[in-house]
Amino acid sequence: MALIKCSNCGNMISDKAKTCPKCGSPVGAQSNDAIADLMHREAVAAMKRGNYDEARNYVNGLLAVKPGDARFLALKQELEELTNPKPQAVNPTGRIIACPNCGQMISSRATKCPKCGQHVVKKSSDQQLVAEQAGLEQKKNSNPNLIVCSGCGHQMSPRALKCPKCGALSPKGETLEKERKEEERMRQEERRQQEIKQKAENESRLYQAAVTSLDNQNYVVAREHIDTLLAENPQEKRYQQLKKKFDDAFNKRVKELRETIEACLESGRLDHAQEDLNTLINLNADEASYRELKQRLDDALWQRAEHDKKAARRRKTIIGTVAAIVILALLAAGGYLYNKHAQAQEELALWQRIEQSATMTDIDQYLADFPEGEHAAQVQELKTKVQEIADQWALIENSNDALTLQEFIDKYPEGVYHDKAAETLDKVLWQKAVVEDAPAAYNQYLKQCPQGVHVAEAQKWLQQHAQQQAELQEKMKLSPGEINLVSSRVSSFFYSMASGYGENMTELIASPMASFLGKKNATASDVIAYMRRVHSGDVYGVDITMGNVNVKKSLISNGDPVYTATFGFDQRLRREDATQETFAHYNGTATVNDRGLITSIGLNKTSHY
């Protein structure tokens, strides 16, 4: 409930009352008087701002409600003196019609109104004659400050959006509808362009990743990226060329591995052939390309195993035969001592070989040939240790745990299983670095594998990453020009709000705003509505005192800058009712895009009185 002043006796009464308790005047009249007072203040404020078109609309509305009020007639006279309108000449040779926008009487031959600039739509001769006659008839008996509906001839306010009689759009309504449709079209086009841009950026990043993977001979990852690109855009020449480059490089690598395996099979280097075959299989090559080689390798390994068994048996047979011959010879010439000496020499040679290589084959041979030999206890202890290492390696041979592999390497600093563990650790840490794509992973690889296969690649990646970080830090620097731009935009917004300059406010904001005082996707109409609420009621003036504006800069995903401003300001309201709130302090946050447009504003009132 609010108190209003009785227009008859001046007594303060409730706006809910039907009559004034003092003089009995109807309250309906009070509401009209209150509306007229508000429109009078708005007209005066508009004239002070120099917005004469807005002031003229208010004055015309006032005279439509109270055509004989002396205050309103004086205000109209003052407005006419300020604008110095030129008298309209009557065309004696043509008919006179009313402008559908402002009501000015103009020639029917005119293409646009000389007063407001509105284009005049030509009608058929019958419709034009009827409309002109209706307009002239209404001109005689109606208010000259109203406009005429082009559809039915009904008079209405120039501020109306639709005809209250037939519902046809007024010139102002048609303009707003065209603006709304154009804004919607622009928003849809902007969204479409953004989607196209985002898709292009994603494809560009994926393309670069495919090129990098191919350069690094990471064929599995490169194939996945290239297949994804071609699935999205199979006609793109760049992707087709990259696919051809990949096929050539991949086929070349497969050919090299096949030739290496062939050479190893020919020379009997079966262990190297097995490693290269595993590499070929891990590349996801066509099984037909290595099926024959795999079969040949399996056959060769089986034959080697059989050969080793036969050689061991043959060696034992030969040793026995030689020993028998030597014994027989020594028996003839005191050969017992010689045979014993020969066995000692053989035992010593085998022991020296075990000390150098400690293979399980030599260890088993020693224990079989010399179970009571001089070094039998040491060989038995060594066998236990070698078997323990072999068992430990068998448990972690296929492990991808870098910590477990490093512990094995530290525990067994030499030997064939140490070398195998080091090779496996190199592969595990490199794969981890490629997947995580982070400095910590590459540094870990360099620390634990200083002699690794991919040391140069890791160092190159770290150098490029450091350069990218330096460039990013340079982009994040906030220049004095950026600070001044953001500060001036935020300050101008609130000074325009205080002055009632709605057009200036809407020129400073993005359309739509991501957030305005808690409202998502706010439009210029929401901003104007907020400004009018500040100036509504008995408020006839607003003063703003801005404090410091602090600016921070950040980058969005496409690399464009966005600015966040924090600020505070005092708002003082000049109002007729001094008992109402006249002061408030606000703290606020605003975001500004790279074009200098405000995209969001949030305010928090911290004190008032």
Image (cartoon, rainbow, N blue to C red):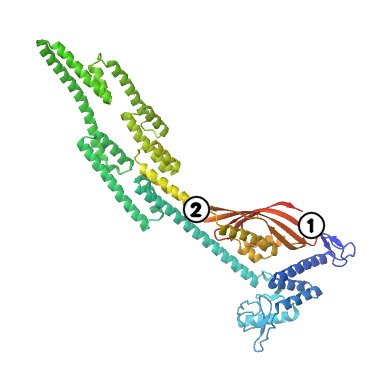
Left or right position of 50 against 230: right
| Amino acid type for the residue under numbered disc 2 | Glu
What residue is shown with label 1? 580
* Label whose residue precedes the other's in the sequence (1 or 2): 2
Establish if 239 lies above or below 56.
Answer: above
Residue labelled with disc 2: 474
Q: Nearer the viewer, residue 428 or 3?
A: 428
Characterize the local packing of mark 2: few (<14), some (14-19) or many (20 or more) Cα atoms within 10 angstroms: few
Badge 1 crowding class, 10 Å Cα cut-off, few under 14, some 14 to 19, many 20 or more, is few
Instruction: Name the quadrant of the N terminus.
Output: bottom right
Q: Nearer the viewer, mark 1 or mark 2?
A: 2
The answer to which of 249 and 425 lies nearer the viewer is: 425
**Disc 1 from disc 2: Cα separation:** 51 Å
373 left or right of 394 in image: left
Task: Single out the residue that lies furthest toward the left.
Answer: 332
Disc 2 is placed on an element classified as helix
- Determine the residue positioned at 13% across, 15% down: 326
**Based on the displayed image, in which of its 4 quarters is residue 299 positioned?**
top left
Q: Amino acid at mark 1?
A: Gln
